[in-house]
Amino acid sequence: MRTSDEVGRPGPGAWTPGRVPLDGLLRALSPTSVQLVVPASAPVDVGAVLLVDADDLRDPDFGPRGPAELWLHAGVPEEAALDWLRAQTERPRAQRPAAVMSKRAGGSAALRAAAREVGLALIAVHPQARWESLLATARDALDRSLGGADSPLARGLTGVDTDLFGLAQTLSSLTRGMVSIEDEQARVLAYSASDDAADEVRRLSILGRAGPSDYLERLRGWGVYDRLRRSDAVVEVPADVELGLRRRLAVSMREIPNEVLRTPARPARPRPLGTIWVQEGSQPLAADAEAVLRGASAVAARLITRTRNAPTNEAIQIQRLLGAKGGGVDVPSLAAALSIPTAGPAVVVGFDAVGPTTAELVGERAAALRLHASAFSRESLVTTLGDRIYLLIPHSAATTSVAAWTHSVLPRLRSRPGAGLRAAVAAPVAQLADVPVARAEVDRVLDGTPGEEGVTTLADARTPVLLREIVDLVAASDALRDPRMEALLAYDQRHGSAMRSSLETYLRHFGDVRAAAAELNVHPNTLRYRLRRAEDLLGIGLGDPQGRLLVEIQLAVLRRRG
C-alpha cells in the first residue's frame, strides 16, 4: 500500500512552498491525535507523506522514487516496525524518512530507542485516530503551504483567517470556546486547540469517530439538525449533565453559487457546506459569541468553496502532463515531482459519465479510482478536467490488460444507482512527452461514443468517432451545409408533415420501404409518396448513391443542431 504526495527536496535552510516544518504540521494534526515522543536529530521539513503497511516495510525494494520525509505506519506491528527501524541505520540518510507516525510508539520503549538510534522523529498516534483522516489533514497542510513564505504553516503556525485551522483558532479566541468545523457529512475539517475541558464528543470527533449515540439521538430529538438545515441562525445546544457533555453553539455554513443570485424573481437556495460548533470550556462563552459565529460562517463558506474549487499542486502537475495547461511543459521536472519515470511507454484512460452528473459525483469517482488504480499500478496518477476523469499509467504498454482492468473497475466506480459510466483507453505512447496525444485520443473516443456504457478504444470505435468528426466539420462550416435541407424543414413546418423523419427512417432501414413504413406506422404507399415529395423539394434523387450519402450527412448535421 502506498499513498503519497511527493515533491522534490529543497536545499537546507530555506523554506520552500509545498513543505511544512514538522512542528507546524503536528500542530495542524492536533495533540488529540498525535504526539511527538522522539524528536529528530535535525530540523525536519515535510514535503511528502507516505502511507505504508507491514508488507511495504518487508519489501527490500520498496520506497518512493522521490523523498518522502514522513511515513505513516498503518497497521504495522511493533516487531515489524522495529526490524524496519533497525535496518534504516544501513541506508543513506537521503533514502530514508525523517519522521514516522505509529500507533505503537506511545507504549513501546523499544521503538522509541530504535528511533533515537537512527535519528528520526517518532510520533505516537492515538489508537482511535483514523489514518485516512491524518493523511488527508497532512495533505491539506502541504497544499495550503503553497501560499508562499508568508503562509501560516511556513511560520510553524496553524494560520489566521486565511485557512480553516486559522479561522478555528481565531474564532476560539474571540468566543472563549473550543471550535470544530465539520463538512456536510459531519467529518471534521479543522479545529482549534483543546484543553482539559474538552468533552467526549469533541475528543471523538477530532479522532474521526462518531459521538455517543445517545447524544446524537438527543440532538435529533431536540430538532438541532433540522434547525441547522433550515436556518442561518445560531442554534444553542444545552449541556447534558447525564452524559457529561458541555453547552454548545452551532451555525450552518452555506454556499450560494455565483450563477444563482438572490433576487425577488429568483430566490437562491444555498447549498449546505457543513457546521461550525463551539463548545463551552471552563469559562462562559463571550457575550457576542453568536454574532462572531455568524461572521465565521460566512468566512468559512468562502474558504471551503475556494479550497474545493482550487486543484491541488499534484492535480495541476498531472494536468500539465496531459497538455491541459498549454505548451512549454518541462516533462523531466514534472516527472521528478510526481515520482514517475520520464522514459518508457505510458497509457491514458479517460472516464466520463453517461447522462447528467455533478461535481460532487465526479470527485467521489476520482477518489475511488485513485485507490483502485494505485492497487493496479503504484505509479498511476488520477486527475479531473471538467466532468471527465483521467488516469495516467506510466511504464505501461499493455493496452489489453489495462482495458481488462478498466472493465473490472467500472462497476466499482458506479457509486450511485442510475449513474452510468464509460471509459476509453488510448494506445500507448512511447514517452511522457507524448501523453497529451494520448489524452486527445481519449477525448476523441469519448466525444464520438456518447451515451454508450463500457470500455472502448479508438481501434474499436473508429467508425462512430470518424463519422462524428466529419459531421462536426460540416456543422462548423456554412459552406458545407446544404441550403436545400432548409427547404425540407420549412415544408414540414408549414404543412405539419413528416418529410424529415420519413427520410431518416427510410435511410436507417437501407431503403427497405416496408420496414420503414412499419416503424412509422404508415402504409408503404404513403411513405413512397413522401419520399418522392422529398426528392422534389431537395432536387436530389435517393436512387443516386452520392445523393443518398449527402442527404444522410446533412440529416446528421440537423440532428447535431437539435
Image (tube, rainbow, N blue to C red):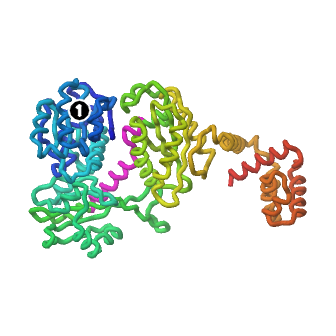
Looking at the rendering, in which quadrant would you find the C terminus? Answer: bottom right
Kindly give the residue lying farthest to the bottom in the view shown: 221
| Amino acid on which the number 1 mark rests in the picture | Pro
Q: Of residues 79 and 277, which is closer to you in this image?
A: 79
- Relative to 210, residue 557 above or below: above
- Our reading of the magenta stretch's main secondary structure is helix
- At horizontal 24% and vertical 37% (from top left) the residue drawn is 70
- Above/below status of 111 relative to 328: below
Report whether 321 appears left or right of 504.
Answer: left
Look at the picture and state if 234 lies above or below 209.
Answer: below
Give me the residue at 17% from left, 27% from top: 89
The image shows residue 302 at horizontal and vertical percentages of 34, 53
In magenta segment, residue 298: yes
Q: Is residue 68 left or right of residue 363?
A: left
Residue bounds of the magenta highlight: 294-317
Q: Is residue 335 magenta?
A: no
